[in-house]
Image (cartoon, rainbow, N blue to C red):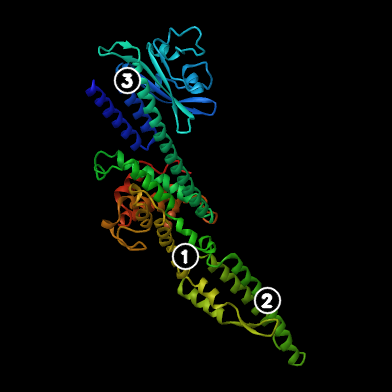
Amino acid sequence: MAEKLKDLIRRLNQIGIALSSETHLPTLLELLVREVRRFTRADAGSLYFKMGNQLRFQVAQNDTLTARKTALTGAFRPYPIPLDKTSIAGYVAVTGETLNIADVYQLRPEAEYRFNPAFDDRNDYRSRSMLALPIGNHDNEIIGVLQLINALDEKGNVTVFDSDHVDLVASLASQAAVAIQNARLITAIHEVFAALVRYSASAIDARSPHTAGHSRRVATYCLRLARAVNDQTSGPFAQISFSDKELEELNYAAWLHDIGKIGVREEVLEKVDRLTPAAMELIASRFEMIKLANLFEAELNGRQAGGGPHNPASEVERSLEETDQDLEFIRQINRAKWIKAEQIERIERIRTKTFRDARGQIRPYLTEEEAHYLSVREGNLTSEEYEEIRAHVLHTLNIINKIPFAKDLERIPLIAAAHHEKLDGSGYPLGLKAPDIMIQARILGLADVYDALTATDRPYRGAMPTEEALKILTREAEAGKLDRDLVELFVTKRLYDGVT
Ligand SMILES: [Fe+2]
Ligand SMILES: [Fe+2]
C-alpha cells in the first residue's frame, strides 16, 4: 500500500511539474486532459472554459473513437453550453459541485441536470460513467469544467470512477488552474505586444503615402517565403526548416524593419520631387517678382534716359520671356529622374543671376540651397537626405535593441538591421557579404525590394506591373545582390499573388 501511495504521489508530482512548465495554452490543456485521463483510466475526456454566460469547449479526447479512426474534430461539433443547471457541465460550473455519476443514462430523477446523448448518437459511442469537476482559480472562481468519461478497469471494461481519485483529480485541476491562468496571461501579453508592434509599424508606415501598409505586406511575403522554404524537400532549401519560433522571429523582424523611419523627417520620406512643393512655389512667386522688378527697372532706365525708350520693348519682352523659360526649366528639373551636366550648368547660371527686390536689395534668382537640391544628378534626394534615409536602419537597430525579447526571439534586431544588405557587399549599413547575411535577412531583403517596387499606394508613380517587378528581382539576383534561390522560389511559387 505504501508503495502504491508513493507511486501515486510521484505521478501526481510529475503531472504537476509538466503542467506548470507548459506556457502554451492549447498544449497545456491537451496535456492536462491526457494526464488526468491516464491517472483515472478514463476512455475519454473534455474540457470547457467559462466565457460570458456560456461554457465553451476547448479539448476533446476519446481513445475508442481515435482507435476507430473517427475524426474526432469532424464528428464532435463543439457547441457552447449555456451556463445553467440543465446540463452536467453547466451544473458543475454553476454550483461548483463535483459529480461522480455511475451511468449518465440512469440519472437520479430528482437531478436538475440532464445528459445530452447527441454526441453518443452521432458517433455510435456509449457514455456511461462520468466524473465532472469544476476548475477553480485561487480566488475560488470557477473558470471551467473538466469532464472525464468511462473509467476503465484492468480488463478494459467501463466502471465507476474511483472515489479515492476524485480529491486527487480536484487538486490537480486547481493546480492546472494556476498554470492555465499563467498561460492565459502570457498569451495576453504576447497579443498586446504583437498588437503594439503592428500599430506602431503601421503608424510609422502611414507617415508617408509611399509606405502605407508596407511593413504588413513585407511580413506577409516573408512568412510565405519561409513556409515555402520549409515545404522544400529537395534542392537548396531541403535542409532548412524554420521552427514556429523562428517564423515568429522573422515575422516580428519584418514588422519592425523600418520602425527606424520614425527618425527620418516626414518631408524627406514624402519627397516626390527634388524640391518640396512649398519650396517650388516660393521660387515661382519669386520669379513673378523678378519679372515685375525687371519691368520696373526698364521703365526707370527709360525715364532716366530722357523719356525715350532706353530699353526697346522687344528687349523687355525678351527678358520676361527668358525669366518664364528659366522657371519652366526649373519646374522640369524639379521633376526629372536624372539630369545632364549641361543642365547643372544652366542651374548654376540661373543661380548667379540677380534682381533688385522691393527694398532695393540685390538678390539671387535661386538660393544656394535651392540650386543644391535641383542639381542632384540622379533621383530626387540630395546626398544628405539620402544619408538621412539610410540611417533608418541604424535607428531601427537602436530601437529594437532596447526591447527585451525572449531568448528564442533574440535575433530579431540582427535580421531587421540587415534588410538593406546585399549579397555582393553593396548594401548598407555594414556592407555585409553573402556568408554574413543570414537567410532570414535575405528573405526580408527580397520582400522589402518587391514591395517597394509594387506598392500601389504611391500617388506619384502608380504601381509597377508584377511582371516588371519580378524581372527586376531576377536581374538583382543575377547581379549577385539578392538570393537567387529565394527569388526563384518567390517567382515560381507565385508567392506575391493576392497580397494587398
Ligand atoms: Fe528599409
Ligand atoms: Fe522596408
Question: Secondary structure beneath disc 2?
Answer: helix
Question: Secondary structure beneath disc 3?
Answer: helix
Q: Is residue 31 visible?
A: yes
Residue 89, given in percent of the width and then of the height, sits at 46, 20
Instruction: Give residue 379's mark.
Output: 1
Under mark 3, the amino acid is Thr
Residue at the image point whose x is 34% and y is 51% from the top: 410
Residue 420, placed above or below residue 322:
above
* Residue named by callout 3: 40
Upstream in the sequence, badge 2 or badge 3?
A: 3
Q: Nearer the viewer, residue 103 or 175?
A: 175
* Residue named by callout 2: 289
- Per the model, the C-alpha gap separating discs 2 and 3 is 94 Å
Q: Nearer the viewer, residue 165 or 49?
A: 165
Residue 107, given in percent of the width and then of the height, sits at 45, 9
Residue sticking out furthest to the left? 3
Q: Nearer the viewer, residue 142 or 334?
A: 142
